[in-house]
Every structure is written in structure tokens, then in C-alpha cells.
């Protein structure tokens, strides 16, 4: 059984410990707590260099030191503290950095409230387990045979047909019924590729509807996997960055992912909560208000200057209020479009990219990477223009097709 | 040599470092820079909104803005410094960052940088004061 070491503060007094353990159990893992003697705590804190007032944070540091020294055996690390505790937020990030500098263990960090449910942690826990148990599969760099990837996302459903490391068919549609959407794009992609369903050797499914699709296409489905690892593989394959380091940014319709990879295998990731203000959904809402299609928003934004129409999408409701006020002030559509893109980029930077150490190059993927104005603004906020590979909106489907070929 | 002082606004530490021929990196200089050189009508009291955002390099969004604003001043100084002098348990008249969390983080950043750092206990009487100055002198001479 995969052992996930929990380094935490406050979980047992927030009524969330059960949910954490439930999430781990549901992906075949077990939460463990590195043993520490009382005498070790002060020594560990001294060595670590950050001396928090909270004793439980000191214990968290001591547990991290035990892992770093190889005194305790674990396969992955889950670092979690209470949301809005400043001291814990400081320690959490530095413990994450310490673990990464001193071990090869995959890490995920999370700040919780008392409302935490196991389902919110599921994708993260599943990704930790995947990285540990499927290292060989994740190291796969070439697709072989005739395989299909199906990505059932919150906004769109995508299908890609691949034959011997080449994309030969692809299609997408706005998500409605999970199975119907997937069947539609699968048929369209197969028609484009010139093949039939019976010819498919393997299917890989990912995204929110992955389990439903895995069951529906069970005769062909060889892989049902969360989107963090699948998207990473798709991104590095599309950008031809299978070796070395990179950061993958995927601003999705419902949540955002920032993943760091080494040789195509993720080792740290953050997944934003359900916050429409910092996701593609805010850009959809902006487009609607500007009465343009979202596909036109990027080009419009590139003609504008965000500084002329400041907007804050910290919350989508207030963001739209800002938008209405700004338009009421007579600002140009171009400036408003640029401000909306800048606001989303800023939110992603402020809320997510602090939880990982950004590595270069930066690869921006997902449907929103087709909005050129957003890519421009992400580049401006990060000080480096991201790479947007061709077919960047199909990362999940490409990753699914690539990884499922490993089962042939 | 550039020497970061902690507390970063200690006039006594500033004077000692300068007196022994080194460049102290202090809050005063950083804030003066902002007041004098920002081309805006109303200079900021201490930091600008941009500074607070830049502080995200040192602490995440969940960390209060006052901590991030402070770290946006001291973080780059610690990076630029060749060494640091840290005085522990000093009364606030000696110098004070005004925030316990920021202080913890400053000490941590110094430690993480791996740069030579002299840690001193605040002197309680004249004899301890003489030893204090002597230790600062020896540390700074050792850096040359």
C-alpha cells in the first residue's frame, strides 16, 4: 500500500482528519505520520531555521526532517495547514521546499477549512499515488499503436486519435451529458482519422467524467487517470519538452493547475479551488458582457492596455461589477478585454504559483491558452512568455492516448 | 561588504556596520529610495501595492499583506547581502520590525541563504555592550 506522509497542523481540531484519510483510502493509499521523539523536535527546528511559535508546526518541521534524513519510509508527502493561518502558510511553503530539496518524494500542499470533503482531495491524492505507482508508465515518451484519449472537462469534452506518435484525428465540443459529449467527439475524431471504433487498440480517459467514460467504454478503456499527471504528459509531448524541467500552467474552465515536471514526470502541483474569478469562466462571462465570442476575446485584448481599465477578478461577481462600471466609464472594449485577461493571470499568479517553484520553460495549455490576450498577460505577470504548443487545448486527450498505449 | 542588519531599522547596528567600513542594508535606505525616486505625486508611506505583490516571492497569498509588504523590502536585501548581523531579544527602541511573523521569516531567510551571519544577544549592561561591539568588529573584519 502506498504510504502518504501527512505533515500538518490543525487537522484534528478542524474535523477534517477523517476526510483526509478517506481520500487517501479511496485511491488505495494510507496516511502515515513520521515518528518523532520529543527530543528531536527542537533539534529539527534549529536545523530548519524557522522557529514557529506553534508547537504543532514545530512537530511538522521535525517530521519533515525525519523524511529528509531517510529515517522514515514514505512514498509521497501531503502538507496541509489551516486556511488563513499566516504562520502556518509560511511554514507550509518552506517545508514543501525543504522536502523537495532533500528527497525525491512527490509533494502536494493544501490549506483547508472545516468544510473540506474527501472529494476535494481525491484528484490530488490520486495524482500522488499515480506518480508513485506508475513511474514507468509516466516515463513513456512515445505513443504507439492506434489509441484514443478522451478528456471530459468541466467546460469542454475533447477526443484525440493517435497512430504511432502522431495525432491523426481530433475533435471537441462543449460538455453536456458526459457520455453523449464523449461519443460525439470520439466519432468525429475517428471519422477525421479514417478509422472505426473497432480498430481502436486502447482508450485513456481523464477529466471530471473519467470514471463514467471508463465504464462506458470498458471494452477498450485501459487507463482511467486524473488530469494532473495525464495533462503533464500531454503538455510535454505537445511542446516536445520530454526531458529536463518545465512548469505547466493550465487555466481551466472550473479550476486551474500548475504543475512542475522533471523529465515529463510531475513532482509538485497545485490545483486551484473552484473559483470562477481566476478561471476561464471569468473570461467567458466577460465575453458575454462584451457580446463577443470567447474566441475573439484574445485578439481584442491584445489591442488594448489593461492599465487603462483596472479590474479585479478576485471574485467573479465583483469582477463583473468592475467590468460593468468600467464599461460605464466609457473605457474601450479592447482595454476591458485586456484588463480581464490580466486580472485572471494575476489571480493565478497570486493564488497558485506561490505554492510551487516555477521552473523554466513555462508551457501554457488548455482551452484558455488559445486566448492570446491571456497568454500575453500570463507572460507579463511572470516576466516570461509561455510556450503554447500546437493543439494545446487537447493536452488531456493527448496524454490519455499516449499513456494508454503503454498498456498495449 | 554589504551587511544586512536585523532588526533592519536599528540605527545603532547601522552605525556600527558603517563605522567599521561596510555597507549596511537597512529599512531606512529602502524606504528613502521609494519616497525620493517614485515619480508619483504622493509618495507611499512605506510601500506600494506593487511591493506587496512582489512580496509574494517570499510568502504566499494566504500570508497577510503586512508580512508580504515587509518581506518585499527585506527579502531582496538578504539576497543582495554578503553577510548578516542578527540581534536577538532586543527591546523595540533598539529596532523592531513590528511583526512577529515577518521577524521569523527574516531570520529563516538569512539561515536559508547560507551567508555568514553573526547572532548576538542584546547586551544588558555596559560590559556586555563592550563585548557586543567587539564581536561586531571582529565579525566584520573577518569578512574582508
Image: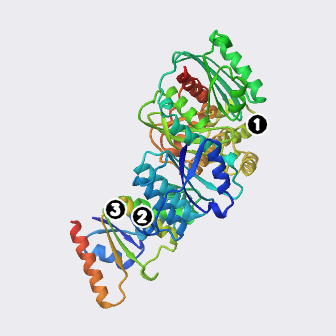
Q: Nearer the viewer, mark 1 or mark 2?
A: 2
Q: Chain of mark 3?
A: B
Q: Is residue A296 left or right of residue A4?
A: right
Q: Element at badge 3?
A: loop
How much space separates mark 3 and mark 1, taking CA atoms?
A: 51 Å
- Name the quarter where the N terminus of chain B is drawn: bottom left
Point 65% across, 57% down: residue: A17
Label 2: how many Cα within 10 Å (few below 14, some 14–19, many 20+): many
Residue holding disc 2: A44
In the displayed structure, would residue B29 be above or below residue A89? Answer: below
Q: Is residue A87 left or right of residue A156?
A: left
A127 or B50, nearer to the observer = A127
In the displayed structure, would residue A272 be above or below residue A195? Answer: below
On residue B81, the disc is 3
Residue holding disc 1: A288
On residue A203, the disc is none
The reply to the same-chain question for discs 1 and 2 is yes
- Name the quarter where the C terminus of chain B is drawn: bottom left
The reply to whether discs 1 and 2 touch (Cβ–Cβ < 8 Å) is no
Q: Element at badge 2?
A: helix
Point 49% across, 66% down: residue: A58
Amino acid at each position: 500500500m502506498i504510504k502518504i506522509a501527512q505533515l500538518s497542523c490543525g487537522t484534528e481540531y478542524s474535523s477534517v482528519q477523517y476526510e483526509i484519510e478517506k481520500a487517501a483510502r479511496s485511491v488505495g493509499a494510507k496516511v502515515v505520520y513520521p515518528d518523532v521523539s520529543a527530543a528531536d523536535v527542537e533539534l529539527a527546528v534549529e536545523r530548519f531555521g524557522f522557529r514557529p511559535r506553534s508547537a504543532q508546526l514545530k512537530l511538522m518541521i521535525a517530521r519533515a526532517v525525519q523524511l529528509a534524513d531517510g529515517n522514515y519510509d514514505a512514498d509521497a508527502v501531503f502538507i496541509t495547514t489551516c486556511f488563513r493561518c499566516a504562520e502556518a502558510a509560511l511554514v507550509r511553503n518552506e517545508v514543501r521546499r525543504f522536502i523537495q530539496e532533500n528527497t525525491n518524494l512527490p509533494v502536494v500542499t493544501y490549506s483547508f477549512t472545516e468544510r473540506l470533503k474527501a472529494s476535494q482531495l481525491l484528484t490530488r491524492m490520486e495524482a500522488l499515488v499515480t506518480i508513485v505507482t506508475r513511474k514507468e508508465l509516466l516515463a513513456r515518451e512515445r505513443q504507439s499503436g492506434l489509441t484514443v484519449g478522451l478528456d471530459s472537462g468541466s467546460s469542454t469534452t475533447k477526443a484525440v486519435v493517435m497512430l504511432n506518435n502522431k495525432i491523426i484525428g481530433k475533435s471537441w465540443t462543449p460538455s453536456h451529458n458526459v457520455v453523449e459529449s464523449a461519443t460525439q467527439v470520439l466519432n468525429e475524431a475517428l471519422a477525421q482519422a479514417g478509422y472505426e471504433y473497432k480498430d481502436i487498440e486502447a482508450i485513456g480517459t481523464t477529466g471530471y467524467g473519467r470514471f463514467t467514460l471508463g465504464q462506458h467504454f470498458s471494452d477498450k478503456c485501459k487507463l482511467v487517470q486524473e488530469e494532473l499527471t495525464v495533462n503533464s504528459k500531454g503538455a510535454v509531448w505537445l511542446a516536445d519538452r520530454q526531458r529536463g524541467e518545465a512548469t505547466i500552467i493550465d487555466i481551466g474552465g472550473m479550476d486551474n493547475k500548475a504543475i512542475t515536471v522533471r523529465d515529463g514526470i510531475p513532482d509538485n502541483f497545485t490545483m486551484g479551488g473552484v473559483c470562477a474569478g481566476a478561471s476561464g469562466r471569468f473570461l467567458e462571462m466577460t465575453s458575454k458582457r462584451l457580446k463577443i465570442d470567447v474566441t475573439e476575446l484574445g485578439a481584442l485584448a491584445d489591442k488594448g492596455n489593461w492599465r487603462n481599465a483596472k479590474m479585479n477578478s478576485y471574485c467573479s461577481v465583483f469582477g463583473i461589477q468592475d467590468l460593468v462600471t468600467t464599461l460605464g466609464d466609457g473605457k474601450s472594449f479592447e482595454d476591458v478585454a485586456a484588463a480581464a485577461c490580466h486580472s485572471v493571470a494575476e489571480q493565478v499568479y497570486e493564488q497558485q504559483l506561490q505554492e510551487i517553484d516555477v521552473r523554466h520553460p513555462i508551457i501554457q495549455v488548455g482551452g484558455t491558452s488559445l486566448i492570446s490576450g491571456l497568454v500575453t498577460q500570463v507572460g507579463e505577470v511572470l516576466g516570461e512568455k509561455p510556450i503554447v504548443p500546437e493543439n494545446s487545448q487537447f493536452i488531456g486527450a493527448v496524454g490519455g492516448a499516449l499513456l494508454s498505449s503503454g498498456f498495449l | 561588504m554589504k551587511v544586512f542588519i536585523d532588526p533592519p531599522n536599528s540605527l545603532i547596528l547601522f552605525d556600527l556596520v558603517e563605522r567599521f567600513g561596510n555597507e549596511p542594508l537597512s529599512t531606512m535606505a529602502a524606504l528613502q529610495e521609494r519616497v525620493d525616486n517614485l515619480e508619483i505625486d504622493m509618495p507611499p508611506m512605506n510601500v506600494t501595492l506593487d511591493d506587496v505583490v512582489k512580496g509574494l516571492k517570499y510568502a504566499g497569498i494566504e500570508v497577510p499583506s503586512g508580512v508580504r509588504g515587509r518581506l518585499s523590502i527585506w527579502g531582496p536585501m538578504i539576497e543582495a547581502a554578503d553577510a548578516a548581523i542578527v540581534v536577538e531579544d532586543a527591546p523595540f527602541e533598539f529596532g523592531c520590525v513590528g511583526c512577529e511573523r515577518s521577524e521569523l521569516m527574516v531570520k529563516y531567510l538569512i539561515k536559508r541563504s547560507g551567508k555568514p551571519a553573526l547572532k548576538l544577544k542584546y547586551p544588558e549592561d555596559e560590559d556586555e555592550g563592550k563585548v557586543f561591539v567587539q564581536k561586531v568588529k571582529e565579525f566584520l573584519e573577518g569578512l574582508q
